[in-house]
Amino acid sequence: MRELLEEVKDLENNKKGEDADCVVSTTKVEQALKQLADLKLEETLGEEIVAQISDPQGAEVKKLISQLEQFKASIHEKPESESQSEADGIVYQFSYRPEQARLAQTTRLAELESRLNRLETVLGCSTDKLSRLTSATKKGSLMEVAEQLSATASMLDSSQLDHIEGRLGALAQKLEGITEKKKQVQQDDEKDKMILELFELVKKNEATLASIPQVINRLKSLNELHSKATDFVKTLTEIEVAQAEITGNIENNKTLLKGVQESFATSLNEINSTVQNLDSRIKALKKK
């Protein structure tokens, strides 16, 4: 009845724009469902009969499941020696045809032989080609070699080739740009040699780079000492100049003193002579 109700609703939805007269309407179907519910068929007929009427496929499935469970229970209950009847269990029949099995086996062997013949024709009976193939591809087995060859073959597709061609074009443009830059910037051999020499010097003096800060501090302290030494030397030179001037003045004073002494001695002699003359004159005057 539910399926009938759903079919009636589908027909009404599909035929809304047409003048179609349905023999059974949805209201009638709903009334019939109510009447069936009022009759209480489950209580009178039983749940199994109602389920078979409403869902026959589900009832069959449930019946099969119950039969399988009964069969399992009977297997566990009966001993192994007791034979089961056909009515109590499920009978399976297997048919084996040895000729057909041999034919299938021979066909498989023929296919394997054809594959081996193909491999022998490609690789040869000796291991030279195989060793060369493994050394060229750097793979240990034929499966790995085949996978690598299939990967390289897949790269030869049209889409992959277009992609590779585009990348090669971009690389060619980059190489052209690099060559142009090399042409624009041409370095001389002498500059290269000087740069190499400087680089070698830097590499040689890498060990002494750690002691450079200490050397700089020492040079700063030595600079201060040198400045003080230059000031001391300047003062010494000034003292020497002053000493030379003093010695010169002393020599001049000595010469002047000597001249004064000589003039004083002469003047003293003259004074003595004049005094003697005066004494003699005074004596002469007294006698008179």
Image (tube, grey):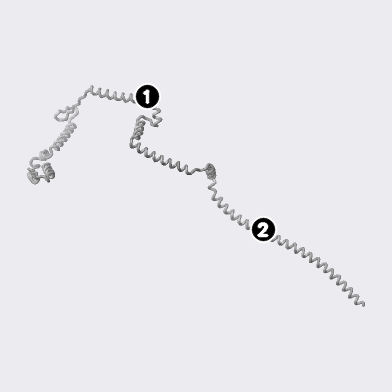
- Residue labelled with disc 2: 237
Q: At 33% across and 25% down in the image, what residue appears? A: 118
Q: Say which mark, if any, is on residue 124.
A: 1
| Apparent side of residue 98 relative to residue 121 in the rendered image (left or right) | left
Amino acid type at image mark 2: Thr
Q: Which sits earlier in the primary sequence, circle 2 or circle 1?
A: 1
Q: At which x and y percent is residue 68?
A: 17, 33
Locate residue 22 relative to residue 117 in the image: left or right. Answer: left
The three-letter amino acid code for the residue at tag 1 is Gly
User: Badge 2 local density, few (<14 within 10 Å), some, or many (20+)?
Assistant: few
Question: Where is the N terminus found, in terms of image quarters?
Answer: top left
**Residue in the image at 35% along x and 26% along y:** 122
Q: Quadrant of residue 229?
A: bottom right
Quadrant housing the C terminus: bottom right
Frontmost residue, 21 versus 5: 21
Nearer-the-camera pick, 57 or 125: 125
Q: Quadrant of residue 64?
A: top left
Q: Is residue 244 above or below residue 169?
A: below
